[in-house]
Image (tube, rainbow, N blue to C red):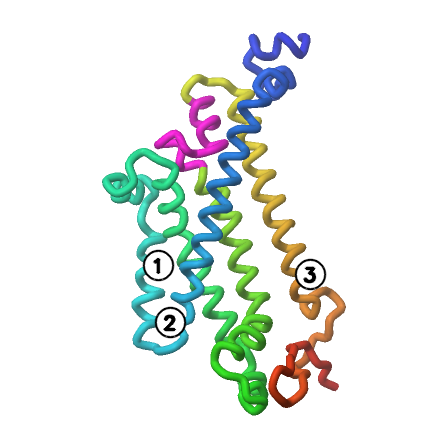
């Protein structure tokens, strides 16, 4: 059977579908990427201060972690229904729901990363005259990056998958094509959109993994299995310092 007739035969694999519906696939992919990126970025911006709050006092840790966990447990249809009066049938409805779902992953990983910073690194920085903000920015954040970026990777892959749920309000990116194909029994559309969704998740994870390895070279394969950290810098006003791994014999 010719490739052109695969549309008539409703085959799962059909190159003619990709050629004739290319713009539709591109538009859905761009919408999927935009919703995912916006949700993860906003989620990080909200999660970071929440993690700092949870770290500051145990009285805040329980409520913050508890609320984010409860939000994650709410079914997507119920979540969107609860948000519908606030945002209507819009892309903001989908992004807000995805942001709320990402909080439990991001807050826990950011908090875990900050709590794992060696106490000796903090004490050394304070001994050099670091204030709280400089200590956070120049010492704690670099050391917490591996756990934080791991959380971003998990949240991103999860959000790529959850974005498809936005199809119920016609803002699901590739999910809208998948649902439309299922309703019309259009096999090529279902398979093509599904494969693209999987590829987006894989590529996003690989891209973030590359960023993580670039920002945290001490975690690469071949790095010392045991080690500590040291703060290099000069004493005095205007001096800079940097945190780097140190081998331990």
Q: Earlier in the sequence, mark 2 or mark 1?
A: 2
Gap between marks 2 and 3 measured at Cα: 29 Å
- The numbered mark at residue 214 is 3
Q: Which residues are magenta?
A: 164-182
Q: Nearer the viewer, mark 2 or mark 1?
A: 2
Left or right of residue 174, residue 246 in this image: right
Decide which of tag 2 and tag 3 comes sooner along the chain: 2
The image position of residue 15, as x and y in percent, is: 65, 18
At mark 1, the secondary structure is: helix
Q: Nearer the viewer, residue 4 or 57?
A: 57
Residue closer to the observer: 78 or 53: 53
What kind of secondary structure does the magenta stretch mostly adopt? helix
Would you call the spot at circle 3 few (<14 residues within 10 Å), some (14-19), or many (20 or more)? Answer: few
Which one is earlier in the sequence, the residue at label 3 or at label 1?
1
Q: Could you tell me which secondary element the residue under label 3 belongs to?
A: helix
Left or right, 248 with reference to 74: right
Q: Which mark is residue 54?
A: 2
Residue at the location (59% across, 66% down)? 146
Which residue was labeled with disc 1?
69
Q: Quadrant of the C terminus?
A: bottom right
The residue depicted at 73 percent of the width and 81 percent of the height is: 247
């Amino acid at each position: 059977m010719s490739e052109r007739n695969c549309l008539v035969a409703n085959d799962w694999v059909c190159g003619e579908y990709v050629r004739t519906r290319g713009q539709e696939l591109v538009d859905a992919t761009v919408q999927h990427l935009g919703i995912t990126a916006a949700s993860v970025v906003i989620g990080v911006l909200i999660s970071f201060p929440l993690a700092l709050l949870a770290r500051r006092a145990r009285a805040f840790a329980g409520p913050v972690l508890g609320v984010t966990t409860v939000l994650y447990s709410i079914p997507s249809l119920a979540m969107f229904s609860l948000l519908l009066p606030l945002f209507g049938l819009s892309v903001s409805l989908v992004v807000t729901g995805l942001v709320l779902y990402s909080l439990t992953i991001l807050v826990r990983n950011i908090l875990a990363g900050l709590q794992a910073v060696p106490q000796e690194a903090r004490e050394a920085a304070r001994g050099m005259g670091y204030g709280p903000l400089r200590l956070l920015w120049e010492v704690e954040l670099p050391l917490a990056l591996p756990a934080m970026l791991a959380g971003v990777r998990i949240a991103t892959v999860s959000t790529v998958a959850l974005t498809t749920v936005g199809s119920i309000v016609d803002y699901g990116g590739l999910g809208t094509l998948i649902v439309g194909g299922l309703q019309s029994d259009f096999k090529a559309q279902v398979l093509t959109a599904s494969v693209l969704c999987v590829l987006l998740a894989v590529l996003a994870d690989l891209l973030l993994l590359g960023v993580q390895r670039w920002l945290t070279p001490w975690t690469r394969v071949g790095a010392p299995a045991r080690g500590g950290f040291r703060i290099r810098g000069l004493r005095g006003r205007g001096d800079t310092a940097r945190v780097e791994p140190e081998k331990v014999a």
